[in-house]
Amino acid sequence: MDKTILVAEDEPFIVESLTFLLSREGHTVEAVADGGEVIAAMHRMRPDLLILDIMMPSSNGFDILQKIRVTPNLQATPVLALTAKGQEADRRRMLELGANDFMTKPFSNVDLVAKVGDLLAGAEGKAG
């Protein structure tokens, strides 16, 4: 199940953890640390999944998600919002904007791998 995952996260430790976990599952992982780079990276690599932090330099996850959902060749990409902002209002807003799922930091490695697997399987089912 070799899939490509883009991680939009500005905390190096989180990026390192996600890269290790997801690579161990057989996925190719690329990361960007600045919100302003996410859309260009998505156009370039066409990821099977985006893991998106809400609080990032240059552009926040809310704005990025809005842009993705109105961009024809990106709008179907599954998005997992992963953030330290765990307030219910943030969760609801991300889901309303089109995030497929939401996790707060700190996260369980087992739960994260399971959610990623579910999102990738769901995307595969829609494409097939």
Image (tube, rainbow, N blue to C red):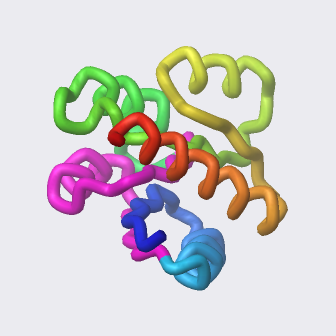
Q: Residue furthest front?
A: 128
In the image, which residues are magenta? 27-55
Is residue 56 in the magenta section? no
At 47% from the left edge and 74% from the top edge, which residue is drawn?
Answer: 27
Q: On the image, which quarter does residue 106 sit in?
A: bottom right
In the picture shown, does residue 34 fall above or below 125?
below
Q: On the image, which quarter does residue 41 sit in?
A: bottom left
At 72% from the left edge and 38% from the top edge, which residue is drawn?
Answer: 85
Left or right of residue 21, residue 86 in this image:
right
In the picture shown, does residue 92 fall above or below 91?
above
Judging depth in this view, the residue of 63 and 109 nearest the camera is: 109
Left or right of residue 53, residue 14 in this image:
right
Is residue 35 in the magenta section? yes
The image position of residue 22, as x and y in percent, is: 57, 73
Quarter that holds the C terminus: top left
Q: Is residue 88 visible?
A: yes
Left or right of residue 44, residue 53 in this image:
right
Image label count: 0
The image position of residue 65, as x and y in percent, is: 41, 31
Left or right of residue 120, residue 106 in this image:
right
